Image (tube, rainbow, N blue to C red):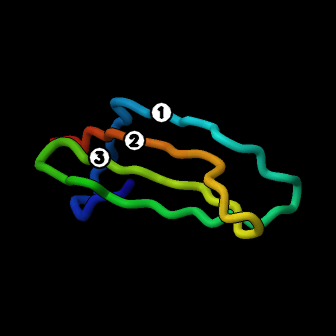
Amino acid sequence: MNCERGAPGVSVDMNITYMNAAKVGEDVLITAHVLKQGRTLAFATVDLTSKVTGKLIAQGRHTKHLGS
């Protein structure tokens, strides 16, 4: 996650939930969304989906402290 301030940040919380396996060489679609960016914290989610089957492979959440 990068912010316009250009200052480095620190990960406060990171979580990954694995739901299905991907095969070696399989194309995976990665979709990320910033849910909220405040003055000091930003919250994002990411979905990894198989391009072949359309199944959700994994979901992640990331909370980042953006610095002062």
Q: Quadrant of the N terminus?
A: bottom left
Using the numbered discs, state the Cα–Cα distance from disc 3 to disc 1 in whole angstroms: 12 Å
N-terminal label among 3 and 1:
1
Which mark sits nearer the N-terminus, 3 or 2? 3
For residue 21, side relative to residue 35 (left or right): right
Q: Quick check: 28 above or below 62?
A: below
Badge 2 local density, few (<14 within 10 Å), some, or many (20+)? some
Is there a contact, CB below 8 Å, between mark 3 and mark 2? Answer: yes
Residue contact at pointers 2 and 1, CB within 8 angstroms: yes
Q: Residues within 10 Å of mark 3 (few under 14, many from 20)?
A: some
Report x, y in % for residue 26: 82, 62
- Residue occupying image coordinates x 70% and y 61%: 50
Identify the element where label 3 is drawn.
strand
Disc 1 element: strand
User: Which residue is found at the position 28% from the left and 51% from the top?
Assistant: 7
| Left or right: 46 as drawn, with respect to 64 | right
* Residue pointed to by mark 1: 15
The answer to which of 12 and 59 lies nearer the viewer is: 59
Amino acid identity at mark 1: Asn
Residue 28 in the image, given as x and y percentages of width and height: 69, 63
Residue at mark 2: 62
Which residue is painted at 63% across and 66% down in the image? 29
